[in-house]
Image (spheres, rainbow, N blue to C red):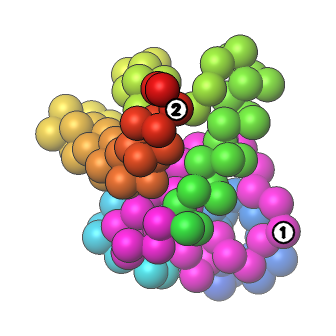
C-alpha cells in the first residue's frame, strides 16, 4: 500500500502521512510538491519534516523561506541537542539518523543544505569578524 493509496483509503489520516509523502516528493526531485504538502500545516511533527521543507526551499531558490526553516531548525536543535543547526550539525544528523542507504544521496542532501546555508549566511559570517 503506497502513501497515496493510504491517504485515499483514510482521508482523515494522520499528519505524518503527508510529511512522509512530502519527503518522497522531495527525494523524487519534486520539491514544489513537498512545499505544497508541508505548507498546509500550522506545525510540523518533527525536526526531519523541517529539514525536508528547508531543503525543498533551497532547491527551488526560495532562500528567504529556507532561512525561516533554518531558524526553526536552530531552535529545535538547541532544545533537543544543545547545539545550533549548522552544516556541520546537519552532517552529523544525517550520519546519526542514516535515512539514506545510498551514500551519494546522503552527500547530495548535505550539499543542498550546505550551499543554501552558505548563500544565506556567508555575508553575515564575514561581517561578524571585525
Query: What residue is rendered at 39% in x and 43% in y?
Result: 122
Residue 16 in sight from this viewpoint: yes
Question: What is the distance, in whole Å, between disc 2 and disc 1 at their CAs?
Answer: 34 Å
Q: Position of residue 7 (x, y in %)?
A: 65, 77
Q: Residue at x 52, y 32 (%)?
A: 128
Q: Secondary structure at mark 2?
A: helix
Q: Which residues are magenta?
A: 35-63
Identity of the residue drawn at 67% across and 29% down: 77
Q: Which mark is residue 128?
A: 2
**Foreground of the two, 43 or 25:** 43
Q: What is the magenta segment's predominant secondary structure?
A: helix
Q: Nearer the viewer, mark 2 or mark 1?
A: 2
Residue on which the image places disc 1 = 42
In front: 75, or 5?
75
- Image height of 64 relative to 114, above or below: below
**Residue 50 falls inside the magenta stretch:** yes
- Give the class, few, some or many, for how many residues have Cα within 10 Å of label 2's Cα (few <14, many ≥20): few
Residue 102 pos. (x, y %): 20, 37
Q: Is residue 8 left or right of residue 101?
A: right
Amino acid at each position: 500500500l503506497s502513501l497515496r493509496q493510504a491517504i485515499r483509503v483514510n482521508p482523515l489520516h494522520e499528519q505524518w502521512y503527508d510529511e512522509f509523502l512530502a519527503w518522497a516528493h522531495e527525494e523524487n526531485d519534486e520539491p514544489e510538491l513537498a512545499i505544497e504538502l508541508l505548507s498546509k500545516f500550522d506545525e510540523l511533527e518533527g525536526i526531519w519534516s523541517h529539514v525536508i521543507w528547508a531543503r525543498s526551499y533551497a532547491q527551488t531558490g526560495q532562500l528567504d523561506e529556507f532561512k525561516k526553516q533554518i531558524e526553526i531548525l536552530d531552535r529545535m536543535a538547541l532544545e533537543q541537542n544543545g547545539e545550533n543547526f549548522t552544516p556541520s550539525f546537519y552532517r552529523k544528523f544525517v550520519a546519526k539518523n542514516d535515512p539514506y542507504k545510498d551514500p551519494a544521496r546522503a552527500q547530495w542532501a548535505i550539499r543542498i543544505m550546505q550551499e543554501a546555508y552558505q548563500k544565506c549566511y556567508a555575508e553575515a559570517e564575514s561581517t561578524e569578524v571585525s
